[in-house]
Structure formats: structure tokens, C-alpha cells
Image (cartoon, helix red, strand yellow):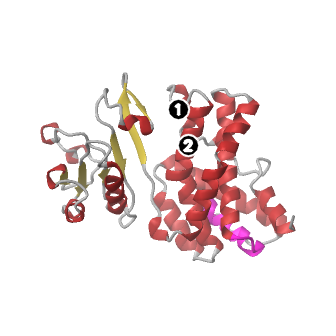
Amino acid sequence: MSAALLSLVQWLSPAFPTGAFAYSHGLEWAISEGEVRDAASARRWIADVLAFGAGRTDAILLAHALRGHDPGALSDLARALAPAAERLRETEEQGAAFAATVAALTGRDLPPRPLPVALGQAAAPLGLPVAEVLALMLHAFAANLVSAAVRFVPLGQTEGQATLAALHPRIGEIAAESAEAPLDALGSASAARRSGGDAARNPGSEDLQDMSHGPLRVGIGGPVGAGKTTLTEKLCAALAHRCSMAVITNDIYTREDAEALMRAQVLPAERIRGVETGAAPTRPSARMPRSTSPPWPTCAAPSRTST
């Protein structure tokens, strides 16, 4: 094994002081709500975070950092893609801790940056294959979440290791895809629905079959140009034959996202509605009145953020 690969393994090990143990990406909440209750549900949850959340986003950012993309621009993009203050604090604090430790070990000048950018800047001189670096980063990310599941579900140690091993094929796939992905492929999604009482939960594929507690609603958000409308188009193409679905888009002044979906003919025109909020979409005054809500289930709703 090369010295370069050993260095990377050390940087990504649980012993490296980045504070990764402090973040679980909603897993502890899911456990407390009963959504993650065994090894199978933990594996599904972690796989979704890898494929649709911070795992994939960080992998794409890391790939571009390894190839020498402007670290300042990547850092700005990483901050813009953080969906919440907690996620922004996580990537910045971990990145700063990582850069400081690697700088102390190597004598290199590594300024604090969001974690995937800091890792890419540090690992670029190692000369390792990009997909290999991404796979090891994703494995470390998944291992941290599995460790949380072992402690809090709880799972047995062997169950935890089996869960991590079962994620290996998906980790390899995401690493290979992310290694070649352009920056405009960046984006993430989160989903929740109401089931039973008022507890929101992350939906699984079985939710497309069981809507007895009301329609499944999926929200897609991100910066302007992140690809929200394209993602919605792809979701509609993949799911329209499996469930009754519709789209509501919102923008401050235009309905161009809805019009783009109509032109693509991903759904019948009557199942696509564009809402002009006239204000920031998060303000109460901009929410669509109940009386204008469509009578059909909403399965995807892209939104455009604006400043």
C-alpha cells in the first residue's frame, strides 16, 4: 500500500480530530421518531443521505477540488448548498479542524474551508485516483452514521458492520458517478410526509404504494441554476407511470419553471401549476392559500430561492 493512500486513510479515520461524531444528519431524530428502528431501516436512511444528500454533494465538490478547481469558488458554492445553519456549521467547522490538523502534520499552508474543499485541497498532491478518494470519503461518512445507529437504535456491533458492508456497492456507484459529474449536477432534496399522527418521516419506496394517510409531498430546493426543474422533470418521467402525481412550482415573479415542465410534457398540463408568490417563498404572506391547493397529490415541488 502506498504512503499516499495510508495518509488518506489516516485523514479519514475516526481518530482524526474533525468532530464528525457530533453530526448524524437527522438520524438521531429519525430513531427517536421510530422511523429508523433496525438494521434495514438504518441502511435505507444512510443510503438516501449518501445518494441524495450531503454524501453526493460533498463527493462532487471533492472531485472538483482534487482536480484543481478554484478553492475559493468551490467554498462559496459549498456554503450556498448548505440547506440549514446546522449543516453549514458542520461543513465549516469540520473543514477548519481538518485543514488545521493536516497543516500541522505536513507543514503545508491549508486555510480553513468547507470540509470537501479542504479535503480535496489537501489530497490533490497525493495523486490518487479521484474515484478512489471519493469512495474512501463516502465510506468514512457512512461509517460515522452507522456508528450513530449502533449507539442509538441500538444495533449490535456485528449488525452495524453488516449494515456498512451492505452499503459498499452503493458507495462505489456514487463515487464513480460523482467523479465525472459537472458542478451543475449539484443539488439535493429532502422529503417528508405525515403519517399516523403528526410525525414527519422520510418516505421509502413503499410510500408510493401506500397513501392511506394522505399524499406524499416532496419539496425540491436550492440556489438558482442548481437544476431543480431538471430534477423535477426526471422524477416525473420516472414516477408518473407508478403513481398519481402533480407539480406545483413557485417563483417570485414568473411561472417559467412550470412552463418548462409543460413544454417537456412530463405530465398533463392540468397537473402542473405555477405559483407567483410576489415575495420570498418562505414568508407567510407568500404561502399559497389553502383554497388554491389542487385536489390531486403533490409529488414534486421545485422552488427557486432569490435574494
Distance, label 2 to label 1, CA atoms, is 9 Å
**Front-lying residue, 119 or 133:** 133
Position of residue 147 measured from the top left corner of the image (x, y, whole percent)? 69, 38
**Magenta-drawn segment:** 113-129
Q: Please report the residue visible at 70 percent of the width from the left and 64 percent of the height from the top.
A: 132
Q: Please report the residue visible at 87 percent of the width from the left and 64 percent of the height from the top.
A: 1
In terms of secondary structure, where does tag 2 sit? loop
| Residue type indicated by callout 2 | His
- Disc 2 marks which residue? 25
Position of residue 136 measured from the top left corner of the image (x, y, whole percent)? 71, 57
Q: Magenta region's main secondary structure? A: helix
Q: Please report the residue visible at 71 percent of the width from the left and 58 percent of the height from the top.
A: 98
Checking the image for residue 29, the label placed there is 1
Q: Please report the residue visible at 30 percent of the width from the left and 48 percent of the height from the top.
A: 241
**Front-lying residue, 302 or 280:** 302
Task: Answer with left or right where residue 127 lies relative to residue 294.
Answer: right
